[in-house]
């Protein structure tokens, strides 16, 4: 009897695990390596310089995946300015999206729990738009990007203190 | 009869297993409440509900009544002939409520009397008959409405509903429920369930429908849900934000927030045709519209001045006027039923508390302690404000405060409960 027209969308959501401290060191190619053979990585023939880490195709695939696994950009309170750490995430995703023109990424904007819920949906969208602008400035095509703001409705972590709020003010880049 | 219609509507909804727990706290105040005594109705093995207690809770929560504890009652009459006036007058009670419940040939009955202990006069005396014992709760709220109106001269608002959202779990396990319960939190029933957020329920003025926000296939949308049939209509789902639906007093339009044309602005949508017009056009975030009771104006939240504050605009459009000035931020305002005040979230010193702003004088009265209170709304009649607050157990729960700040209640439910929307009174 209960109406449940909304449930299907949950499958699309699949929140990816947040934060990956090892991601940063993969932004620099280690050493010149053999070109990766076409079609063996999940992303096609190349993924910037990063995909060329390692000697074998599977190593490259792992490296590429690792680079993209750091997919969360965090924000200061009441701000949509992208930090240096956030800019590094933007760089890696810009490279991936340009190398894979058919791929798409959804930018999910989030806010911490303070303030009203619908205003926070607005803040989440503003943050997602900041990431969208940064990606487009790096040459990413607009039609590869979709925006969705969740406001404070999907916190990454529970808790009502600054440590929790800092983790919840974020944009998550979700490959489609 | 109106309550029968509503009851039929709710029968199609699933029952929620969780029990509500109502906690009432009364503190000192400057307005003297009216003393009243409600004697336990003559008990019956067929009716387990303590009807007098439900009526008492309703009346006390309004902040307008002070109830005599049962232990201090001079006698326990159940019919007018048994009332010994002098004992009640000595106890300071002018208004006495007594009654009986039981089973009759065609169902269950409740009979009550409101007695003036000074004159001995019956101010009210009425019998209700219902087909199931479960309907006794509705009868109790109707009795509270009659007593409230008789003694205060304004309509009671207890035979009403509240809609709210409950969330639980994190990450992929998160789930959301839209729930409708009695105004005292009892008899919660699930209206909609989703793995994606449900937000911002708003009652139609005839309380037959709820508008709310949901998410579906990577988009948000405004839905209109007819309670009697369970029918759900997707009214708007543009790219970007589809948020903050607010029903107009005439029931024909919804004000809402859309961002597809650039950034969040306020729009007014005709519910029947779906046609819409844009009411605000500013690069700031404009959201959380709410109609004045006469439908001539809307208030909304905007950060066009840097921080979010409350602005007022004519329904026909034109320049918006800022109305909140006290506090670093003010958010999510809505009008009192007489249109003379707003309730809103006031943020200052890191605390988010419920405020009431007198529109004529500009005076702001803070009515809650925070630290994370939100979603305030006047109950019908305007005697109390309902809002969401962080509970002691960590989860959010619903609370009410009388507008003099004297009487507070907590409505405990399972899960993280927020965004209460009080249904209108049916006339």
Image (cartoon, rainbow, N blue to C red):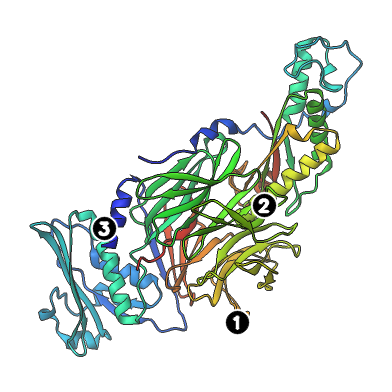
Chain of the residue where label 1 is placed in the rendered structure: B
The mark nearer the N terminus, 1 or 3, is: 3
Quick check: B369 above or below B131?
below
Quick check: A144 above or below B307?
above
Mark 2 packing: few (<14 Cα in 10 Å), some, or many (20+)?
many
- Residue A114 visible in rendering: no
Viewer-proximal residue among A161 and B217: B217
Image location (x, y in percent) of residue B263: 71, 52
Say which element carries label 3.
helix
Q: Are marks 2 and 3 in contact (CB under 8 Å)?
A: no
The quarter in which the C terminus of chain B is drawn is bottom left
Q: Are marks 2 and 1 in contact (CB under 8 Å)?
A: no
Q: Which residue is depicted at the point 40% across and 84% down?
A: B32
In three-dimensional space, the C-alpha distance between marks 2 and 1, rounded to whole angstroms, equals 30 Å
Task: Write down the residue under mark 2.
Answer: A122
**Residue reaching furthest to the right:** A32
Image location (x, y in percent) of residue A112: 65, 50
Q: Nearer the viewer, mark 2 or mark 3?
A: 3
Instruction: Answer yes or no: are tags 1 and 3 on the same subunit.
Output: yes
Task: Write down the residue under mark 3.
Answer: B4
Chain of the residue where label 3 is placed in the rendered structure: B
Quick check: B76 above or below A129?
below
Mark 1 packing: few (<14 Cα in 10 Å), some, or many (20+)?
few
Chain of the residue where label 2 is placed in the rendered structure: A
Q: Which residue is depicted at the point 20% across and 57% down?
A: B48
The quarter in which the N terminus of chain B is drawn is bottom left
Instruction: Answer yes or no: are tags 2 and 3 on the same subunit.
Output: no
Viewer-proximal residue among B220 and A149: B220
Viewer-proximal residue among A134 and A30: A134
Residue B360 numbered mark, or none: 1
Image location (x, y in percent) of residue B215: 56, 41
Image location (x, y in percent) of residue B150: 29, 80
């Amino acid at each position: 009897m209960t109406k449940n027209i909304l449930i299907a969308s949950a499958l699309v959501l699949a929140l990816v695990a947040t934060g990956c401290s090892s991601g940063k060191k993969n932004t620099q190619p280690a050493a010149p390596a053999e070109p990766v053979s076409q079609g063996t990585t999940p992303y096609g023939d190349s993924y910037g310089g990063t995909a060329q880490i390692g000697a074998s195709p599977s190593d490259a695939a792992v490296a590429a995946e690792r680079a993209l696994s750091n997919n969360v950009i965090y924000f200061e309170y009441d701000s949509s300015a992208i930090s240096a750490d956030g800019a590094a995430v933007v760089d890696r995703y810009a490279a991936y999206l340009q190398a894979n023109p058919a791929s798409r990424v959804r930018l999910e904007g989030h806010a911490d729990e303070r303030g009203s819920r619908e205003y926070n949906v607005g803040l989440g969208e503003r943050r997602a738009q900041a990431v969208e602008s940064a990606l487009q400035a790096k040459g990413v095509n607009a039609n590869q990007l979709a925006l969705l703001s969740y406001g404070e409705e999907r916190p990454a972590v529970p808790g009502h203190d600054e440590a929790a709020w800092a983790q919840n003010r974020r944009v998550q880049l979700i490959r489609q | 009869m109106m309550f029968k219609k509503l009851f039929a509507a709710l029968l199609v909804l699933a029952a929620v297993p969780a029990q509500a727990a109502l906690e009432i706290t009364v503190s000192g105040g400057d307005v003297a409440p009216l003393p009243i005594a409600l004697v336990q109705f003559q008990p019956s093995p067929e009716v387990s509900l303590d009807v007098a207690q439900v009526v008492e809770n309703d009346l006390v929560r309004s902040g307008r009544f002070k109830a005599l504890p049962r232990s201090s009652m001079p006698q326990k009459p159940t019919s007018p002939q048994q009332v010994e006036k002098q004992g009640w007058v000595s106890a300071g009670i002018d208004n006495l409520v007594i009654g009986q419940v039981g089973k009759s040939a065609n169902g269950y009955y409740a009979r009550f009397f409101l007695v003036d202990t000074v004159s001995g006069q019956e101010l009210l005396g009425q019998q209700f008959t219902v087909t199931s014992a479960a309907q006794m709760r509705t009868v109790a709220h109707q009795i509270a409405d009659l007593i409230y109106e008789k003694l205060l001269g304004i309509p009671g608002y207890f035979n009403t509903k509240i809609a709210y959202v409950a969330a639980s779990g994190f990450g992929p396990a998160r789930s959301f429920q839209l729930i409708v319960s009695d105004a005292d939190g009892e008899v919660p029933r699930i209206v909609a369930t989703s793995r994606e957020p449900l937000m911002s329920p708003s009652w139609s003025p005839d309380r037959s429908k709820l508008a709310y926000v949901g998410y579906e296939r990577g988009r948000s949308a405004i839905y209109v849900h007819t309670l009697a049939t369970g029918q759900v209509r997707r009214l708007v789902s543009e790219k970007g934000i589809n948020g903050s639906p607010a029903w107009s007093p005439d029931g024909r339009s919804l004000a809402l927030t859309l961002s597809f044309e650039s950034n969040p602005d306020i729009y007014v949508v005709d519910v029947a045709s779906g046609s819409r017009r844009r009411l605000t056009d500013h690069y700031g975030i404009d959201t959380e519209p709410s109609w004045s009771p006469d439908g001539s104006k809307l208030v909304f939240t905007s950060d066009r001045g840097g921080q979010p504050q409350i602005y007022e605009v004519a329904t026909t459009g034109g320049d918006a006027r800022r109305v909140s000035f006290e506090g670093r931020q003010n958010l999510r305002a809505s009008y009192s039923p007489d249109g003379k005040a707003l309730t809103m979230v006031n943020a200052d010193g890191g605390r988010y508390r419920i405020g009431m702003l007198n529109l004529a004088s500009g005076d702001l009265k803070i009515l809650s302690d925070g630290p994370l209170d939100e979603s305030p709304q006047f109950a019908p009649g305007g005697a109390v404000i309902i809002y969401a607050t962080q509970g002691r157990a960590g989860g959010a729960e619903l609370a009410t405060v009388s507008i003099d700040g004297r009487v507070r209640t907590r409505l405990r439910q399972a899960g993280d409960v927020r965004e209460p929307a009080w249904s209108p009174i049916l006339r």
